[in-house]
Amino acid sequence: MKRAGTMAVLAGAALVVFGGCAVAEEPPIQGGEPGTWELLDAGSVTARTTVLRLGVTRVDCSGGVTGKVLEPKVIYEQTRIVIETEVEALNLKAANCPGNPQVPTRLELSEPIGQRDLIDGYCIKGEAVPTSFCVTAVRRPGH
């Protein structure tokens, strides 16, 4: 049985080598790079709000490109809602830092905000904490 499994692996490898497919392709990148966020319409956010409009900015230097925003991660807690936003990895070896633009992003929450604080998750842990993006992690205090 072990020999049959080995033969199947070798046959698969031969298909890749001789077929010319996927040899030069790299696997898709899993995960992303940190992005911080701000509320684009903070004045309209209430305790009953379930849809947020965020402006997401890449934390790292990238020559003025924020890039594609990935699906935000949301953690619902009793006193706060922690939102982490990531942007697609650019895999740059070096880049200058002219500042990166905000990318408007719509986030649908599974429950109303209520009286909870809205927290930028990358401003409570990770490389964004000491940056000017994270003067405070609280994007909207609960009431």
Image (cartoon, grey):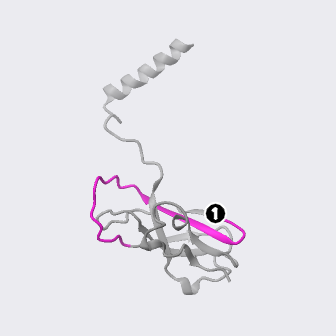
Q: Position of residue 105 (x, y in %)?
A: 48, 70
Residue type, label 1: Ile
Q: Is residue 17 left or right of residue 37?
A: left
Q: Which residues are magenta?
A: 75-101
Is residue 72 highlighted in magenta?
no
Q: Which residue is mark 1?
A: 75
**Residue 45 location, quadrant:** bottom right
Going 42% across and 46% down the picture, which residue do you hit?
28
Q: Is residue 64 left or right of residue 48?
A: left
Q: Is residue 20 visible?
A: yes
**Residue 107 location, quadrant:** bottom right
Q: Position of residue 143 (x, y in %)?
A: 68, 83
Is residue 88 highlighted in magenta?
yes
Q: Is residue 103 visible?
A: no
Query: Quadrant where the N terminus lies?
Result: top right
In the depicted view, which residue is nearer to us: 143 or 7?
143
In the image, residue 70 sits, relative to residue 52, either above or below, namely above
